[in-house]
Amino acid sequence: VEPGRSRPHARLGLRQLNPETGSALDGRKATEASIAGSSCSFCGETSATWFTWSAKPWGVVVCSKCGLGRTVPLPNPAETQALYAGDYADESARKFGGGLEIGRRFFARRLANRIVRRAPPGGRVLDIGCGDGKLLLALAQRGFSCVGTELNPRVPETVPKESGVEVRVGDLESARFPSASFQVVIIRHVLEHLRDPAATLREIRRVVDDRGVLLLAMPNLDSWQGRLLRD
């Protein structure tokens, strides 16, 4: 949902839910019960409406003022680290297996080809939250110098050494990259998980070259998948 659009509740067909029982609540009770202490990272508004069907253990709400979605409650750093080091991925640092992994490799190659059309090979690429590194491996094969950051501590061990891809465990801020050191910065489906996305965007602006390319992807709550699944 883009900030600034009007009437996000009516457009998305949102309803107020009690995250404990799934029963309908009026807006005030829902906000007081489950969104207290949470504010929109874009406009600061605290009033919000439930988007997901439930909030166990986390849910998504939509800001009543600007329409931006956010996770509530946000997991703390220890919880986030446990997710990535535990059940989020298997020992190979992959999310899925079988045919889905083949599809992910195909998508990574297609996306790499699109990036090549925007940024000539030979430059440095940073992928923030690079997962198992499929996209970086595809870009390295196309002549880029590739670096990734990832919370999953197993990823650096699974990336082939001969690929030249470097993966640093941790978040972007802790990596302390030099200013203007990347021609391409990629951050896909990461911002919505961060406690302070604005700070990460400022750091991206610092490390990307003035003529660099930023590839950013986030969930669209107004998509048919979002409205159908609500999860």
Image: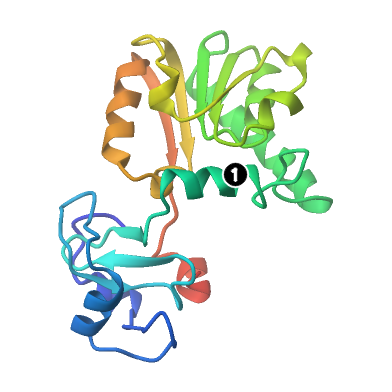
**In this rendering, is residue 19 above or below 124?**
below
Examine the image and state in which quarter residue 158 appears: top right
**Front-most of 98 and 138?**
98
Examine the image and state in which quarter residue 166 appears: top right
Residue 83 location, x and y as percent? 58, 49
Residue position marked by numbered label 1 in the rendering: 84
Residue 95 location, x and y as percent? 69, 48
Q: Is residue 22 left or right of residue 2?
A: right
**In this rendering, is residue 220 above or below 102?**
below
Q: Amino acid at mark 1?
A: Tyr
Residue 106 location, x and y as percent? 73, 40
Report crowding for label 1: few under 14, some 14 to 19, many 20 or more residues within 10 A (C-alpha): some
**In this rendering, is residue 32 above or below 184?**
below
Name the residue: 37% across, 72% down: 51
Q: Is residue 189 visible?
A: no
Q: Secondary structure at mark 1?
A: helix
**Front-most of 209 and 176?**
176
Residue 79 location, x and y as percent? 49, 50
Instruction: Point out the residue furthest to the right here.
Output: 98
Image quadrant for the N terminus? bottom left
Q: Is residue 194 visible?
A: yes
